[in-house]
Image (cartoon, rainbow, N blue to C red):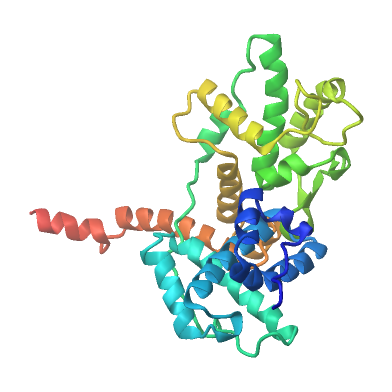
Amino acid sequence: MTTAPTVDSKSKAWLSAELAATIESDAALRELLAPVHRWLNTLSVRNHSPHTLTAYFAGLNQLALFLRGKRLTWTRCDKRQLAQHISQRLDEDKLALASVQQELSAIRHFYGWLIEEDLARINPTTGYQLKRSPRPLPSIADVDLLTQLLDQEIPDTPEQARLWLRDKAMFELLYSSGLRVGELVALDMADVDLSDLRVRVTGKGNKTRLVPLGIKAAEAITRYLPHRNLWVEQMDTALFISEKLGTRLSTRAVQQRLKVAATRAGIAQNMYPHLLRHCFASHMLSGSGDLRAVQEMLGHSDISTTQIYTHVDFAKLTQVYDRAHPRATHAQNNKDST
Protein backbone atom coordinates (compact mmCIF):
# COMPACT_ATOMS: atom_id res chain seq x y z
CA MET A 1 0.00 0.00 0.00
CA THR A 2 1.47 3.37 -1.03
CA THR A 3 1.35 6.43 1.17
CA ALA A 4 -0.01 9.68 -0.28
CA PRO A 5 2.62 12.44 -0.37
CA THR A 6 2.58 14.99 2.39
CA VAL A 7 2.01 18.69 1.78
CA ASP A 8 5.27 20.31 0.64
CA SER A 9 6.67 22.85 3.10
CA LYS A 10 7.06 25.32 0.23
CA SER A 11 3.28 25.34 -0.12
CA LYS A 12 2.94 27.67 2.85
CA ALA A 13 3.04 30.61 0.44
CA TRP A 14 -0.46 29.73 -0.84
CA LEU A 15 -1.79 27.44 1.88
CA SER A 16 -3.11 28.38 5.32
CA ALA A 17 -2.17 26.22 8.31
CA GLU A 18 -5.82 25.23 8.79
CA LEU A 19 -6.25 24.13 5.18
CA ALA A 20 -2.90 22.32 5.22
CA ALA A 21 -4.04 20.31 8.25
CA THR A 22 -7.30 19.44 6.49
CA ILE A 23 -5.48 18.24 3.39
CA GLU A 24 -2.95 16.32 5.46
CA SER A 25 -5.74 14.29 7.07
CA ASP A 26 -7.37 13.44 3.71
CA ALA A 27 -5.21 10.98 1.75
CA ALA A 28 -7.33 11.09 -1.44
CA LEU A 29 -7.35 14.87 -1.56
CA ARG A 30 -3.64 14.99 -0.75
CA GLU A 31 -2.93 12.67 -3.68
CA LEU A 32 -4.95 14.86 -6.04
CA LEU A 33 -3.25 18.05 -4.89
CA ALA A 34 0.32 16.73 -5.12
CA PRO A 35 0.79 17.80 -8.79
CA VAL A 36 -0.91 21.14 -8.01
CA HIS A 37 1.77 21.86 -5.41
CA ARG A 38 4.48 20.90 -7.91
CA TRP A 39 3.00 23.28 -10.50
CA LEU A 40 2.69 26.14 -8.04
CA ASN A 41 6.26 25.61 -6.86
CA THR A 42 7.32 25.98 -10.50
CA LEU A 43 5.37 29.24 -10.80
CA SER A 44 6.87 30.46 -7.52
CA VAL A 45 10.36 30.02 -8.93
CA ARG A 46 9.23 32.13 -11.91
CA ASN A 47 8.36 34.95 -9.48
CA HIS A 48 4.58 34.73 -9.66
CA SER A 49 3.10 36.71 -6.77
CA PRO A 50 1.87 34.96 -3.60
CA HIS A 51 -1.56 36.45 -4.29
CA THR A 52 -1.69 34.75 -7.71
CA LEU A 53 -0.48 31.43 -6.29
CA THR A 54 -3.08 31.56 -3.51
CA ALA A 55 -5.87 32.28 -6.03
CA TYR A 56 -4.72 29.46 -8.33
CA PHE A 57 -4.60 26.99 -5.45
CA ALA A 58 -8.05 27.99 -4.19
CA GLY A 59 -9.62 27.31 -7.58
CA LEU A 60 -7.85 23.99 -8.12
CA ASN A 61 -8.59 22.87 -4.57
CA GLN A 62 -12.31 23.30 -5.29
CA LEU A 63 -12.05 21.16 -8.42
CA ALA A 64 -10.00 18.58 -6.50
CA LEU A 65 -12.74 18.37 -3.87
CA PHE A 66 -15.28 17.84 -6.63
CA LEU A 67 -13.17 15.10 -8.27
CA ARG A 68 -12.54 13.39 -4.95
CA GLY A 69 -16.29 13.28 -4.34
CA LYS A 70 -16.76 11.64 -7.75
CA ARG A 71 -13.77 9.33 -7.19
CA LEU A 72 -12.11 10.75 -10.28
CA THR A 73 -8.56 11.83 -11.09
CA TRP A 74 -7.30 14.80 -13.10
CA THR A 75 -7.00 12.65 -16.24
CA ARG A 76 -10.59 11.42 -15.94
CA CYS A 77 -12.08 14.92 -15.78
CA ASP A 78 -13.73 15.66 -19.13
CA LYS A 79 -15.79 18.62 -20.40
CA ARG A 80 -18.99 17.16 -18.95
CA GLN A 81 -17.45 16.84 -15.50
CA LEU A 82 -15.94 20.31 -15.75
CA ALA A 83 -19.29 21.83 -16.77
CA GLN A 84 -20.95 20.13 -13.81
CA HIS A 85 -18.33 21.53 -11.43
CA ILE A 86 -18.61 25.04 -12.88
CA SER A 87 -22.40 24.89 -12.67
CA GLN A 88 -22.12 23.88 -9.02
CA ARG A 89 -19.80 26.82 -8.29
CA LEU A 90 -22.24 29.24 -9.91
CA ASP A 91 -25.61 27.85 -8.81
CA GLU A 92 -24.96 26.15 -5.47
CA ASP A 93 -21.93 28.02 -4.14
CA LYS A 94 -23.29 31.33 -5.50
CA LEU A 95 -19.86 32.39 -6.73
CA ALA A 96 -19.68 35.53 -8.86
CA LEU A 97 -19.11 34.97 -12.58
CA ALA A 98 -15.80 36.87 -12.43
CA SER A 99 -14.55 34.59 -9.64
CA VAL A 100 -15.52 31.48 -11.61
CA GLN A 101 -13.68 32.91 -14.62
CA GLN A 102 -10.55 33.16 -12.45
CA GLU A 103 -10.94 29.57 -11.28
CA LEU A 104 -11.41 28.40 -14.87
CA SER A 105 -8.25 30.24 -15.87
CA ALA A 106 -6.29 28.46 -13.12
CA ILE A 107 -7.67 25.09 -14.26
CA ARG A 108 -6.79 25.85 -17.89
CA HIS A 109 -3.19 26.76 -17.05
CA PHE A 110 -2.76 23.79 -14.72
CA TYR A 111 -3.90 21.33 -17.38
CA GLY A 112 -1.51 22.97 -19.82
CA TRP A 113 1.31 22.18 -17.41
CA LEU A 114 0.06 18.59 -16.88
CA ILE A 115 0.20 18.04 -20.65
CA GLU A 116 3.71 19.53 -20.86
CA GLU A 117 4.80 17.14 -18.10
CA ASP A 118 3.15 14.14 -19.87
CA LEU A 119 0.81 13.74 -16.90
CA ALA A 120 -2.32 14.30 -19.01
CA ARG A 121 -3.27 14.18 -22.68
CA ILE A 122 -6.42 16.28 -22.82
CA ASN A 123 -7.22 19.73 -21.43
CA PRO A 124 -10.96 19.71 -20.58
CA THR A 125 -11.06 23.51 -20.69
CA THR A 126 -10.20 23.60 -24.40
CA GLY A 127 -13.11 25.26 -26.19
CA TYR A 128 -15.01 25.66 -22.92
CA GLN A 129 -16.06 29.25 -22.27
CA LEU A 130 -18.33 31.04 -19.87
CA LYS A 131 -20.47 33.87 -21.14
CA ARG A 132 -18.80 37.05 -19.98
CA SER A 133 -20.85 39.61 -18.12
CA PRO A 134 -20.58 43.18 -19.42
CA ARG A 135 -17.56 44.94 -17.93
CA PRO A 136 -18.87 47.76 -15.71
CA LEU A 137 -17.78 51.23 -16.69
CA PRO A 138 -15.32 52.69 -14.19
CA SER A 139 -16.39 55.58 -12.01
CA ILE A 140 -14.86 58.85 -13.12
CA ALA A 141 -14.53 62.15 -11.26
CA ASP A 142 -14.49 65.32 -13.33
CA VAL A 143 -11.55 67.71 -13.43
CA ASP A 144 -13.26 70.23 -11.12
CA LEU A 145 -13.66 67.61 -8.40
CA LEU A 146 -10.01 66.61 -8.65
CA THR A 147 -9.04 70.27 -8.48
CA GLN A 148 -11.15 70.57 -5.32
CA LEU A 149 -9.23 67.63 -3.83
CA LEU A 150 -5.70 68.52 -4.91
CA ASP A 151 -5.83 72.30 -4.52
CA GLN A 152 -7.51 72.38 -1.11
CA GLU A 153 -6.11 74.67 1.59
CA ILE A 154 -3.26 73.31 3.67
CA PRO A 155 -4.46 72.23 7.16
CA ASP A 156 -3.97 74.62 10.09
CA THR A 157 -2.17 72.33 12.53
CA PRO A 158 1.56 71.67 11.89
CA GLU A 159 1.14 67.89 12.15
CA GLN A 160 -1.70 67.75 9.65
CA ALA A 161 0.08 70.23 7.40
CA ARG A 162 3.14 67.94 7.25
CA LEU A 163 0.99 64.93 6.45
CA TRP A 164 -0.86 66.85 3.74
CA LEU A 165 2.42 67.64 1.98
CA ARG A 166 3.07 63.90 1.73
CA ASP A 167 -0.54 63.04 0.88
CA LYS A 168 -0.77 65.70 -1.81
CA ALA A 169 2.42 64.33 -3.39
CA MET A 170 0.90 60.84 -3.43
CA PHE A 171 -2.44 61.92 -4.88
CA GLU A 172 -0.83 64.18 -7.48
CA LEU A 173 1.36 61.25 -8.55
CA LEU A 174 -1.56 58.81 -8.75
CA TYR A 175 -3.48 61.21 -10.99
CA SER A 176 -0.44 62.51 -12.88
CA SER A 177 0.95 59.14 -13.91
CA GLY A 178 -2.01 56.75 -13.58
CA LEU A 179 -0.37 54.45 -11.04
CA ARG A 180 -2.00 51.61 -9.18
CA VAL A 181 -1.85 52.11 -5.42
CA GLY A 182 0.39 49.05 -5.10
CA GLU A 183 2.78 50.57 -7.63
CA LEU A 184 2.74 53.86 -5.73
CA VAL A 185 3.75 52.41 -2.37
CA ALA A 186 6.40 50.22 -4.03
CA LEU A 187 8.23 53.25 -5.44
CA ASP A 188 11.76 53.89 -4.19
CA MET A 189 13.54 57.23 -4.18
CA ALA A 190 15.62 56.16 -7.18
CA ASP A 191 12.48 55.49 -9.24
CA VAL A 192 11.52 59.16 -9.51
CA ASP A 193 13.48 61.50 -11.78
CA LEU A 194 12.39 65.04 -10.89
CA SER A 195 14.70 66.66 -13.43
CA ASP A 196 13.56 64.65 -16.45
CA LEU A 197 9.98 64.40 -15.12
CA ARG A 198 9.53 60.66 -15.32
CA VAL A 199 8.90 57.78 -12.95
CA ARG A 200 9.97 54.14 -13.25
CA VAL A 201 7.09 51.86 -12.25
CA THR A 202 7.15 48.13 -11.52
CA GLY A 203 3.72 46.77 -12.36
CA LYS A 204 1.99 43.41 -12.61
CA GLY A 205 4.26 40.51 -13.47
CA ASN A 206 7.27 42.57 -12.36
CA LYS A 207 7.12 44.45 -15.66
CA THR A 208 8.83 47.85 -15.58
CA ARG A 209 7.61 50.89 -17.48
CA LEU A 210 8.59 54.56 -17.66
CA VAL A 211 5.73 57.03 -17.22
CA PRO A 212 5.78 60.83 -17.60
CA LEU A 213 5.59 62.84 -14.37
CA GLY A 214 3.42 65.97 -14.32
CA ILE A 215 4.99 69.24 -13.17
CA LYS A 216 2.48 69.64 -10.34
CA ALA A 217 3.29 66.15 -9.08
CA ALA A 218 7.01 66.90 -9.28
CA GLU A 219 6.53 70.14 -7.33
CA ALA A 220 4.45 68.34 -4.68
CA ILE A 221 7.09 65.62 -4.28
CA THR A 222 9.83 68.26 -3.98
CA ARG A 223 7.94 69.98 -1.15
CA TYR A 224 7.41 66.64 0.61
CA LEU A 225 10.98 65.29 0.42
CA PRO A 226 12.50 67.36 3.31
CA HIS A 227 9.87 65.86 5.66
CA ARG A 228 10.40 62.40 4.25
CA ASN A 229 14.13 62.63 4.95
CA LEU A 230 13.39 63.57 8.57
CA TRP A 231 10.91 60.72 9.09
CA VAL A 232 12.83 57.86 7.45
CA GLU A 233 14.29 55.12 9.66
CA GLN A 234 16.93 52.45 8.96
CA MET A 235 17.84 53.89 5.56
CA ASP A 236 14.51 52.81 4.06
CA THR A 237 14.58 53.43 0.29
CA ALA A 238 10.81 53.96 -0.03
CA LEU A 239 9.60 57.24 -1.53
CA PHE A 240 6.49 57.47 0.65
CA ILE A 241 7.17 57.02 4.36
CA SER A 242 4.95 56.68 7.41
CA GLU A 243 5.64 59.59 9.77
CA LYS A 244 5.05 57.38 12.83
CA LEU A 245 6.96 54.29 11.72
CA GLY A 246 9.60 55.80 9.45
CA THR A 247 9.10 52.94 6.98
CA ARG A 248 7.30 52.31 3.70
CA LEU A 249 3.66 53.37 3.68
CA SER A 250 1.02 50.64 3.18
CA THR A 251 -1.74 50.62 0.55
CA ARG A 252 -4.30 50.68 3.36
CA ALA A 253 -2.77 53.87 4.72
CA VAL A 254 -3.01 55.55 1.30
CA GLN A 255 -6.68 54.57 1.03
CA GLN A 256 -7.44 55.99 4.47
CA ARG A 257 -5.54 59.24 3.86
CA LEU A 258 -7.41 59.82 0.58
CA LYS A 259 -10.76 59.51 2.38
CA VAL A 260 -9.55 61.97 5.04
CA ALA A 261 -8.46 64.45 2.36
CA ALA A 262 -11.74 64.10 0.45
CA THR A 263 -13.78 64.74 3.60
CA ARG A 264 -11.66 67.76 4.47
CA ALA A 265 -12.20 69.13 0.96
CA GLY A 266 -15.97 68.76 1.29
CA ILE A 267 -16.23 66.03 -1.37
CA ALA A 268 -19.23 63.72 -0.99
CA GLN A 269 -18.22 61.26 -3.75
CA ASN A 270 -16.48 58.08 -2.60
CA MET A 271 -12.77 58.63 -3.27
CA TYR A 272 -10.32 55.73 -3.52
CA PRO A 273 -6.84 55.48 -5.10
CA HIS A 274 -7.92 53.52 -8.19
CA LEU A 275 -10.44 56.27 -9.00
CA LEU A 276 -7.49 58.61 -9.61
CA ARG A 277 -6.05 56.05 -12.05
CA HIS A 278 -9.42 55.86 -13.83
CA CYS A 279 -9.50 59.66 -14.05
CA PHE A 280 -5.97 59.76 -15.45
CA ALA A 281 -6.92 57.27 -18.18
CA SER A 282 -10.21 58.91 -19.10
CA HIS A 283 -8.88 62.47 -19.10
CA MET A 284 -5.75 61.49 -21.06
CA LEU A 285 -7.80 59.63 -23.65
CA SER A 286 -10.38 62.37 -24.08
CA GLY A 287 -7.59 64.93 -24.44
CA SER A 288 -5.33 62.98 -26.79
CA GLY A 289 -7.34 60.20 -28.42
CA ASP A 290 -4.13 58.12 -28.40
CA LEU A 291 -5.27 54.73 -27.12
CA ARG A 292 -1.88 53.04 -27.55
CA ALA A 293 -0.05 55.71 -25.57
CA VAL A 294 -2.57 55.49 -22.72
CA GLN A 295 -2.25 51.68 -22.78
CA GLU A 296 1.53 52.02 -22.42
CA MET A 297 1.29 54.48 -19.55
CA LEU A 298 -1.25 52.35 -17.68
CA GLY A 299 0.83 49.21 -18.15
CA HIS A 300 -2.04 47.23 -19.72
CA SER A 301 -0.82 44.10 -21.53
CA ASP A 302 -4.04 43.93 -23.56
CA ILE A 303 -5.41 47.03 -25.28
CA SER A 304 -8.97 45.76 -24.74
CA THR A 305 -8.52 46.63 -21.07
CA THR A 306 -7.70 50.21 -22.03
CA GLN A 307 -10.58 50.42 -24.50
CA ILE A 308 -13.13 50.56 -21.69
CA TYR A 309 -12.19 54.23 -21.31
CA THR A 310 -13.35 54.87 -24.87
CA HIS A 311 -16.77 53.65 -23.68
CA VAL A 312 -16.70 56.22 -20.90
CA ASP A 313 -16.07 58.95 -23.43
CA PHE A 314 -18.73 57.56 -25.75
CA ALA A 315 -21.28 57.75 -22.94
CA LYS A 316 -20.54 61.46 -22.67
CA LEU A 317 -20.78 61.87 -26.45
CA THR A 318 -24.17 60.15 -26.40
CA GLN A 319 -25.46 62.62 -23.82
CA VAL A 320 -24.32 65.54 -25.98
CA TYR A 321 -25.86 63.93 -29.06
CA ASP A 322 -29.20 63.31 -27.35
CA ARG A 323 -29.37 66.93 -26.22
CA ALA A 324 -28.35 68.49 -29.50
CA HIS A 325 -29.32 66.45 -32.56
CA PRO A 326 -32.77 67.18 -34.04
CA ARG A 327 -33.40 63.48 -34.72
CA ALA A 328 -32.03 62.21 -31.41
CA THR A 329 -33.92 60.79 -28.43
CA HIS A 330 -34.93 64.14 -26.99
CA ALA A 331 -36.65 65.13 -30.23
CA GLN A 332 -38.77 61.96 -30.22
CA ASN A 333 -39.63 62.45 -26.55
CA ASN A 334 -40.78 66.01 -27.21
CA LYS A 335 -43.00 64.86 -30.07
CA ASP A 336 -44.57 62.16 -27.90
CA SER A 337 -45.39 64.67 -25.17
CA THR A 338 -47.44 66.92 -27.52
> Could you tell whether 187 is left or right of 336 in the image?
right
Quarter that holds the C terminus:
bottom left
Left-right relation of 45 to 141: right
Quadrant in which residue 286 is drawn: bottom right
Answer yes or no: is residue 207 visible.
no
Extreme residue toward the right, this view: 235
Front residue of 323/28: it is 28
For image coordinates 59% across by 61% down, the residue present is 58
Residue at the location (87% across, 33% down)? 236
Q: Residue 113: x and y, percent?
A: 71, 79
The residue at the point 61 percent across, 47 percent down is: 277
In the displayed structure, 207 sits above or below 107; it is: above
Q: Residue at x 49, y 51 (%)?
A: 138
Q: How many marks?
A: 0
Q: Pinpoint residue 311: horizontal percent, then vertical percent.
A: 47, 60
Residue 135: horizontal and vertical position, in percent? 46, 61
Q: Residue furthest top?
A: 157
Q: Is residue 117 or residue 69 the one in the foreground?
A: 69
Nearest the eye: 183 or 61: 61
Q: Is residue 41 visible?
A: yes
Does residue 14 lie above or below 303 as drawn? above
Name the side, left or right, on which 120 lies relative to 237.
Answer: left
Which percent across, then down, holds residue 110? 65, 75
| The furthest residue to the front | 1
Q: Name the quadrant of the N terminus.
A: bottom right
Q: Residue furthest left?
A: 338
